[in-house]
Image (cartoon, helix red, strand yellow):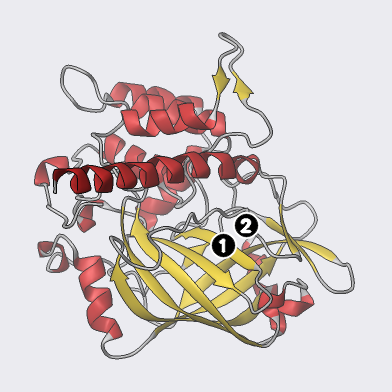
Amino acid sequence: MKPSIAMNETRRHSSLISRYALIAVSIGAIAGLFAWTGGWIRWPSTQQALTPARLIDAFEADTSPHPGFRRNHAKGVCVSGHFESNGNGAQLSRASVFKAGVVPLVGRLSAPGFDPTQEDDTAMVRSFALRFTTSDGEQWRMAMNSVPIFAVRTPEALYQQLAALRPDAASGRVDPAKMEMFLEKHPETKAFHEWLASHPASSNFYNASYFSINAFRFTNAQGNTRFVRWSVVPDATYQPVSAAMTRDPDFLAHDLSKRLERGPVRWNLMITPAAPGDPTNDATRVWPQERELHRVDAGVLVIDKAESQIDGACRDINFDPLVLPAGIEPSDDPLLAARSSAYAVSFNRRTREEAQAAQSANTRR
């Protein structure tokens, strides 16, 4: 990976449409990069397969090359700590991570976007990815965003959004008319846009709430099954970004490091069960607010260390949200069912690029 981050003001997006579109398409760390795991999608007009490789090609076509970096959420920071489970989650899932006790974790805090040199004030969303590893060797990986819903419902829509974002060859800019056409064709994106407009980005990584976005199926020791979504809620009080903070193009990572010098940061892991009729296959739709009255506080996430993503503990982790322990399964959400294969392609490309760069450097010595 690159040894340092050079900032470039010319990459800022001034157009509301292009700015919104960039965030919408790149949200979800840790939740973009979709393709079917059990085959592929075929377009009716051409019968051309939408494979994981083609989808990631589309991500790459919308930016200049950044070898060795993630194709989305390219700028981030590694974190580590532990999960203090209080045992309450066991009423919903038999997963060993919910037994009372402490589980170590490694994570990554990031902002959406293709460019690792982008300035932090361009990001309207924060993202949080985690890998829990229990004493019995099971893992639970998750990828969350600071928005409770996703911009599009299907991999097809994501691919179409990427096409609309592709810069014009002559001007190098996104064509707002293409994005307008996309938004007209996909009115479900309106809810995401409205949420962003009414929730300014948090001033820090550690004072934002993060959401699973997709639904999952939990099964407890008695064999009872519930669909759930979850969120992590910070101890720190939310504050929006201030103008003074944006003078530092890397304020998110810098402020996190300074905060951790005073001690750990914490979030409560809150699990929200669905009720009959709540959508489990559509990440663009929120569940009724009253569901939060029945959410379960499963314990506390504690982060006590941050380090560079260049050589930190999260560098070589693929935060595939389908890596799940016994007692947790994916729902029928088409985005969840599609993510693993494309994540693998992206991971393989960036690690291959790193290996090639290292080999080249050794050859020159």
SS type, badge 2: loop
Q: Position of residue 269 (x, y in %)?
A: 57, 75
Q: Residue at x 16, y 57 (%)?
A: 4
Q: Amino acid at mark 1?
A: Arg
SS type, badge 1: strand
| Nearer to the camera, 322 or 210 | 322
Tell me if 170 is positioned left or right of 34 in this view.
left
| Residue 183 seen in the current view | no
Q: Residue at x 70, y 49 (%)?
A: 279
Q: Amino acid at mark 2?
A: Val
Q: Residues within 10 Å of mark 2 (few under 14, many from 20)?
A: some
Quadrant housing residue 332? top right
Quadrant housing residue 356? top left
- List the residue tagged with mark 2: 323
- Total marks shown come to 2
**Marks 2 & 1, CB-CB < 8 Å contact:** yes
- List the residue tagged with mark 1: 141
Tell me if 160 is positioned left or right of 22 in this view.
right
- Check residue 171 in the rendering and tell me which mark sits there, or answer none: none
